[in-house]
Amino acid sequence: MDNNGITQSFINLTNALDYQKYDVTVFTNTPKSHFFHNYQKLNKNIRLIFRTGSPNFSEKEQMLHDKINKSGHITSLPEVAFKREAHRLFSGLSFDKAIDFSGYSFYWSKFVAFSDSRVKMIFQHNDLYAEMTKEIDGKFPHKKLTGVFELYHYFDKVISVSKALMTINSHKLSKYIEAEQLDYLPNLIFLGNDFVSEKKEEALFNLNGIYSFINSEIRIFQNPKVNSVFEVKSFSKNEIVKVLSTKKVQDIIFVKILVNDIYLGWVEFSELKFSGNETKKVVKVKKVASIVKKQNFLIYQNIPNFFPGEKDEAVTETKYVTQQYWFVNKVLFTKQGKVAYISNGLGIKGWVRYGALNRFHNLANKPYLALGFLIHNLRNKCLTSSKITFEKYQFKLRKNSTSYYSRPKGLKFSKKLEAGFLNQSLDYSTDEQQMVKGTWWVKTYNNGKFVCWLKLADIELIDGISSINKNENSFDDIIQKIMSDKKDKIPQFVNVARLSPEKNQKVLIEAFAKLKTTGVEAKLYILGSGILKEELETKIIELNLSGSVQLLGHMENIRNFLSLMDYFIFPSLYEGQGMALLEAMSVGLLPIVSDIPTSREIVAGGNYGIISESNDEQGLALAMMKALKKEEFSSFDLESYNQNVINRIKLIL
């Protein structure tokens, strides 16, 4: 249930089902807090079963299972064990139909393949052979998809999300699939009414912790209401205040508090100063774990407060060390969550959110195992920062400053930039500083836009200014700028996709730079999150496009944002179907797509939009120039499209 197209497709499908006809059970992982909102979107009629406990495998069964997981190939399959495990997880339930909607993981596919079900189906959301051979940073993240392919003969139907994709996968995976298994079911498209950005959306955070009073006289409310009865009481600033619960009323945050462990009532949160988390317990452990790769976390020098709006001093970022193993020595439980003290055995150590860790191994009485993990870390050693601070201040460049980099020198994705794009007469600002190999580097902004990293020795603080406003443009500011650009008739291009190699955004940015060299004044917005964020940011800086290209992160319910755009550009090297492309066409954007079978199918061979003559920088630039000529294309009918999909759902189910 991550933030991706498969999750959105699944939510759309389950919300279209007739629950008078279907009784639906969804088997999934235990929700992680940062993806919980996706579970809340599921239809209320759905019954959820979460993966719990450990499999009851014998030693031999576990060995066979691990061998398949490690190799991605099935030489000997412990069918009895998998059937027993499916029976345990599903509490002995039988199903008319069992569907593996993801189709990306042997771990999950086997439960459906060996469930007690009359009909078993598995989905294909992409060109899976291309996914299996995809290389990212020297790694092949989906190389073990063969384990899923070799399970296909246990399924009655193998369903692609477009007719074109069915043809692609049937050809490339013909050794695994029989013709009678093949079918296709396109994605349903339901557009949300409002857009919510990652940068804009902030749920009411957990404020539990220890505080002190800012002032000596405090208003104590009987109830968390704006016009509630209150009395004024006097307190020392040394009183220990604990927050029990939180309620927001008309933009005012009220908190229920204890003072010196005695219940007092409700106060306005603005009256309190944060002092730290309340520790519930500390558990010593002896484990090793991996770092979650889909997100970047900070490793903190001291126990972090995690206080909203503030960042604690850190050691480094996990994105640089995802290939290393981490020794976990203790786990700290607070009311705001769990943190773990970790070390890689090579000098990097500190506190990290417990959710940043996965794939734990017990090291108790296993010194040989610990040594093996340490040797692995030595082989995968890399340069990282040794300290990160988050001070905010403004500065100017010193004369003869030349050390301009996309990241602090020596770090992954770090590249030296041309010296000419900064101006010594301008004011710059920072909100983050990193020490790398004994040298301090300053993250530099101009007018709220990130431009580069500078050596601290190359800047001069502006006298009399000790703090600055938030550097990054607020989402409201971005919308206002878009509205202003539209009034000035500046073309607005948008791409919505995961930041991943197959989405071809690096070439898109290069093509946009080529478009700009023709004298076209235009803007490009890229919506999505992913592992290539750093690399794309570097490319934007290298090409001097900071004022024209922006990465806006993941966004939900994008209909209103898309309606502000003029053109949707979709340069993917391969796709399953392209839900974002369908969504953009549904709100009337002219699509510009790469020449791949699934996108060609969606734009009806060019009837609905422009197909690039080649999937490279030159081809995309020419396609964008063609779009600016305002040719007429047919309109996409979303209602008719969805009705056809619903008819196919009835046919397949």
Image (cartoon, rainbow, N blue to C red):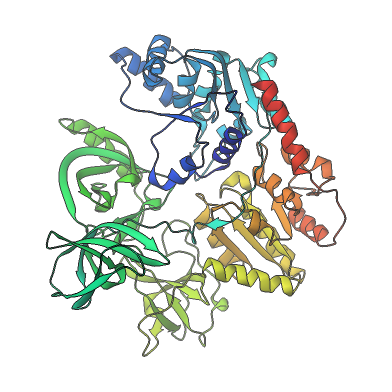
Q: Is residue 47 above or below residue 585?
A: above
Across and down, in percent, residue 559 comes to: 65, 53
> Would you say 290 lies left or right of 295 here?
left
> Would you say 293 lies left or right of 197 here?
left
Across and down, in percent, residue 542 comes to: 58, 66
Across and down, in percent, residue 446 comes to: 51, 77
Q: Quadrant of residue 36?
A: top left
Q: Is residue 215 above or below residue 72?
A: below
Q: Nearer the viewer, residue 102 or 502?
A: 102
Q: Quadrant of residue 495?
A: bottom right
Q: Nearer the viewer, residue 480 or 396?
A: 480
Across and down, in percent, residue 70 comes to: 41, 26
Q: How many numbered marks have been drawn onto this rendered protein structure? A: 0
Q: Residue furthest front?
A: 229
Quadrant that contains the C terminus? top right
**Residue name at image x 32 percent, y 56 percent:** 206
**Residue name at image x 29 percent, y 46 percent:** 354
Q: Residue furthest bottom?
A: 463
Q: Quadrant of residue 275?
A: bottom left
Res 545 seen here? no
> Would you say 346 lies left or right of 429 here?
left
**Residue name at image x 15 percent, y 30 percent:** 365
